[in-house]
Amino acid sequence: MSLYTEKDFHRLKPIESNKGDLPQDASRTDVRRDYARILHSPAFRRLQGKTQLFPGDETDFFRNRLTHSLEVAQIAKDIAIKINHDVEFFKMGENSINPDICEIAGLIHDLGHPPFGHNGEKALDDCMKSTGGFEGNAQTLHILLRTEKKEMGPGANYATGYEKAVDKRLGLNLTHRVVASALKYDQIIPYCRKKTDKLVKGYYSIDSEMIDTIKSNIRQNVSSDKPFKTIECQIMDIADDIAYSTYDIEDALKAEFITPFDIISCGSGITGQIAKKINETEGRDFITSDEVKRRLLEIFGSTLAPITEPFGEYKGGDDPSATLKLYELLEKVTSSYEASKWFSQNGYIRTSSTSFLVHWFILGVKVDINEEDPTQSKVYLDEETKKNVEVLKHYCFINLINSPKLKISEFRGYDIIRSIFAVLTNSDEEGHKLLPADFQKIYEILPTNTAKNRLVCDFIAGMTDRYAIEFYGRLNSENPQSIFKPF
């Protein structure tokens, strides 16, 4: 079996053969058409206003969701090219992984990311628990399949994308294989969950029919009961982990949230949390706290050698020269600490370190070919590389994302999202009239509160961080901005 078939490049609606008087461009492939549709979409542009780790309005250095997506796309494409070069099965033309699909997967993987990061995601999920839930990956698919304004089915009203109350929107109407590259979790999110239930990763029940069509066109071994995840999606997932684990560290060093000195002095409390989180994710005893500590030292070993070296020289004890040695040690430690700060502030060293890590981690990519269905071939990191990536990734999460400075911002974001949702879904006060005109038109034809809540959720999820704060301020502030500024 080959890696791609004709059905992979079908769409939910075939592209019209002739638009106006323009001739068809025979040089343009279906995948390149999809690439253009993504790149020119409002959802992709909005990623520039969504925070990756640090707020971007305080400096122009830090990454945002847009720059992060570009980096993931580049890494994913490089992984695909490397596999095609190294693995005999993929060297054959018909079995070569399409690098453009992997690149697109990187570009689209965070489209569904709401304002205010994980707290924004939790806030919207809490608002939607009784009406289908919310989750960033599911929202990405929902954007591609429904909410982006590009294509609609026959009979749809051109102003709303609906035929009466029937949703005829087709989103960007991408090829099946490109949409599948964003399908990370092959399960439907339960329609109704308890308030205490945790967030569920998957896709929305309202999109399940479309996704079933896409999967049936791609899956070559129809009898397989294993979760569906294409080779391009797996490559994107690895690229995301690599980018997240390295570039967030660089941003943290630049922000002086951490220094290399902080990394090597990481206490057992932190390393224990990291090990616990990794083992929970893996579902097994994958790594110990001591190994986390050792790997942090190994990863930054060559860089941190001048910092760790002095500690091997001080023995202490009753030696009369011990005091002098202690002073000498402290002087070296002070110098090492200054060197550590210099490392954080030196762009050449930071760039060199992240470049080295990305290259090192890409070299750890492995493939197990699925002969019955090559689309489901397994792409993974070898155990050594995976441990290093997971240690860095969870170090970022526990030491940075969970830090009080960033938590304050995210906690405020939770309240902002909940407040906006409550106002817009308040039917007694006709809150929907605060929606933009195009959303209002759709809202007023929807027959159920479930559908209306989903529409409001889609509107809020698409907001940038700044727009959400501004919208909230105009609803609640004692000094709102001009009423003549449109929403």
Image (spheres, grey):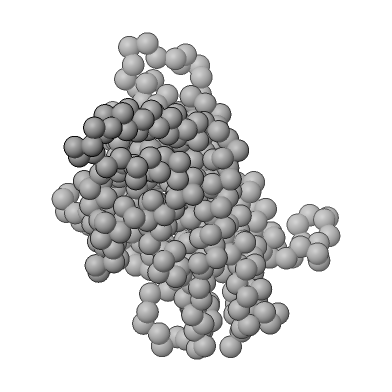
Q: Is residue 276 above or below residue 258?
A: below
Toward which corner of the image does residue 225 lie, by quadrant?
A: bottom left
Position of residue 389 measured from the top left corner of the image (x, y, whole percent)? 42, 57
Position of residue 22 measured from the top left corner of the image (x, y, whole percent)? 82, 55
Given residues 294 and 225, the one toward you in this image is 294
Q: Residue furthest top?
A: 479
Q: Which residue is painted at 65% across and 56% down in the image?
A: 35
Toward which corner of the image does residue 463 lie, by quadrant?
A: top left
Q: Is residue 11 above or below residue 314?
A: below
Left or right: 257 in relation to 426: right
Residue 13 seen = no
Residue 125 seen = yes
Q: Which residue is painted at 75% across and 57% down in the image?
A: 19
Quadrant containing the N terminus is bottom right
Q: Which residue is painted at 44% across and 64% down in the image?
A: 385
Left or right: 221 in relation to 104: left
Q: Is residue 411 above or below residue 313?
A: above
Q: Which residue is painted at 30% across and 43% down in the image?
A: 266
Position of residue 413 measured from the top left corner of the image (x, y, whole percent)? 33, 33
Position of residue 301 measured from the top left corner of the image (x, y, whole percent)? 44, 50
Given residues 354 and 167, the one toward you in this image is 354
Q: How many marks overall?
A: 0
Given residues 389 and 487, the one toward you in this image is 389
